[in-house]
Amino acid sequence: MRNRMHVTGAGRYTAQDIARKVGVHPSTVSRALNPATRHRLSEDVTARILAAAEELGYVRNDLAASLRTRNSMTVGVVLPDITNPVFPPILEGIEAVLSAERYVAIVANAGSEEAHQRLVVERLLARQVDGLILATVTRRDSLVDFCLKAGAPVVVINRSEAAGDHRVSSVVSDDARGMKLAVDHLVELGHRHIGHIAGPLNLSTGKGRLEGFGAAMQAHHLPAPGANVILATAFSREAGREAASRLLDRRPDLTAVVAANDLLAIGLYDALADRGLACPGDISVVGHNDMPFVDLISPPLTTVRIRHREMGERSAEILLKKVQGAAEGGVDLVLKPDLVARASTAQPRQPRARP
Amino acid sequence: MRNRMHVTGAGRYTAQDIARKVGVHPSTVSRALNPATRHRLSEDVTARILAAAEELGYVRNDLAASLRTRNSMTVGVVLPDITNPVFPPILEGIEAVLSAERYVAIVANAGSEEAHQRLVVERLLARQVDGLILATVTRRDSLVDFCLKAGAPVVVINRSEAAGDHRVSSVVSDDARGMKLAVDHLVELGHRHIGHIAGPLNLSTGKGRLEGFGAAMQAHHLPAPGANVILATAFSREAGREAASRLLDRRPDLTAVVAANDLLAIGLYDALADRGLACPGDISVVGHNDMPFVDLISPPLTTVRIRHREMGERSAEILLKKVQGAAEGGVDLVLKPDLVARASTAQPRQPRARP
DNA sequence: GCTCTCCATGCATTCGATTGCACAACCCAT
DNA sequence: ATGGGTTGTGCAATCGAATGCATGGAGAGC
């Protein structure tokens, strides 16, 4: 009775099998199975087709449908490093929104090498992804050029391109506000000698937070960035330790340091431990991101909370809108972060009077 | 000259376009582009085709190829919860192995509800995934039945089905050995009164670790599981806190507790803090998993390290072998964990003599 | 009772690449 | 020169679903 029994074995029927069984044409089956075209059929036929499909355990071959409709219902998510703890919540948000619309995410770890990133994106495009979410971009990123040239809808997330380049939509955190929250908090505690460990300036987060730090300091009539700022070579614990070490050597008068992200802050913890300094006793520390479990480290890290899950959700929503043709032009969504005060910040030992 | 300029715009050519340009048949283009069939063509034609493909920036439509070849080069990865920190390294490992073979991972967050898991898998199967990696399974899991009935190659990871059910391949950690390492370590430090916070027994990790705990205790002639064991309702911080609280009430004589995973251990930290007990001063704590950043919490957690990345790699390798038809029967791979001694374990305050 | 609609369904093509088979051309041996 | 073998390429079918157009039949209107 059954003529098809492929390698993958059991019960893989096609619309034709149903058509045969019900005694209608395959196209009728297709229409019956599609809620959007179902209304054109008589209730009787529709019911019989649905029953037969149910009985045979029919599962549509989405690949075949995609080929015809030119919609793969798939989006590519390109990450620089899956193991960075900010990404799981982002992915969760993306996945939740996509799956509600019957889309699916292909997650690709593309590293930070441009050639490899391009290879990864090319493979995703070959699979006909309907759009891309890029978490890898630098402030002027040729990968974005590449995607645009390929005509793929793109949303960049977490990091953006240089301000003013409204080539693609973006969802990022308000870095200026985040830094202002951090500096305000420290100033309120009585700190005047505040340092900053900046991230790589080719990333929007590195640059944006440095600028935000400067602006926030100036608002309090504190010195603009100078010797109190050090540049970390990467957003990593090790780079943070190394940068912090140099900063602490150079500026022994600092009573607080704002790190451009949590990993750098943890590196700063390491550097403090190296030289026997206490946090927050000797130096108060503020991070950025509120990544999972920084509330558990010692001391629990005061940090700027970014709602990563929401970031993922929004980016997926924007992308889907674009894919479905509803959206015109680019959207630049800037999410408002909050400060989460924990135990890594306290009043300085000898609060100084305002100058 | 160009007749196709689709919505997705720029430069999307097909094999036919190349064929036309070179003056050959599309099938010849296909053969030239496939390294495995290339040898059947004259060097001249091959070269001209490759040149034309290069010039036009040809990208193959993998969907069309998949439809014909019945290989989607895609595997589904089904997780109970992306945000669980053990998964990023697992995903990284999976992704690395897959992408080396030009496969791609679709990551799906399926929760722990059976109906929803089934829906998710059904969608993955509709997309013709070549295989599935399941991280969701319970000890007797109908989802596995479902996948097997659908004829899909399956590897279960992290958790396995009940021992003896060799229905699918699995990659897990050696829970018995892990618990033995933990108990041995504590005994060596002088502990005799050791408790265990067990995870849900419907999960292989919960049950396996409980049994491993019992075996390790007996090996030291210490009491088999009884009042010194408490059951947590989930592998979560909150469940750990709650369970630990009851355990500490019931057995104030304990000097050490082994938790079935790190999250439970962190909940135990919470419970200790609640009642003003010090770790490791009053109670030594051992976790399980060595998830990221437990070296940073206070005190740094002594735990059993599972090489999650490797777990991901192996599972992907096994699955690919199966997909490519090279493997027969099931493989049960058991990875050896290590103990990582940190500061949450120390000698008990008053080491007791052996009974 | 006859035409005119309209509606349900069938037919045939399409998406783009792969592949079994056919066949023409060429080579070598007899 | 003829036959057999090889080799390179074309042809056409195929994967499975979607869809524009055609068509047959029922029902309505006059």
Image (cartoon, coloured by chain):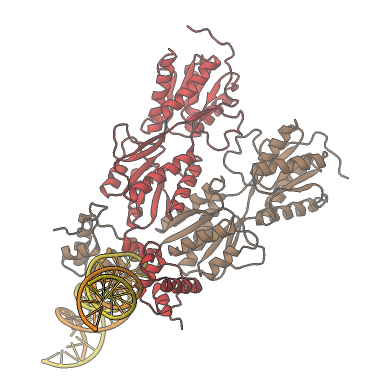
Chain colours: A red, B brown, C orange, D yellow
How many marks overall? 0
Q: Nearer the viewer, residue D2 or B69?
A: B69
Residue drawn at x 31%, y 61% as measured from the top left: B61
Question: Does residue B222 appear in the picture of this structure?
Answer: yes
| Left or right side of B75 for B219 | right
Q: Residue shown at 43%/56% (left/top)?
A: A102
Q: Position of residue A174 (x, y in %)?
A: 42, 30
Residue A111 appears anywhere in the view: no
Q: Position of residue A153 (x, y in %)?
A: 32, 47
The picture places residue B353, in percent across and down from the top left corner, at 86, 41
Q: Is residue A120 left or right of residue B322?
A: left
| Residue C1 drawn above or below residue A104 | below
Q: Is A257 situated above or below A13? A: above
Name the residue nearer the viewer: A148 or A114: A148
The residue at the far right in this view is B355
Residue A134 lies, in percent from the top left, at: 38, 44
Please state if A189 lies on the left or on the right of B4 as rendered: right
Does residue B268 appear to the left or right of A268 in the view shown?
right
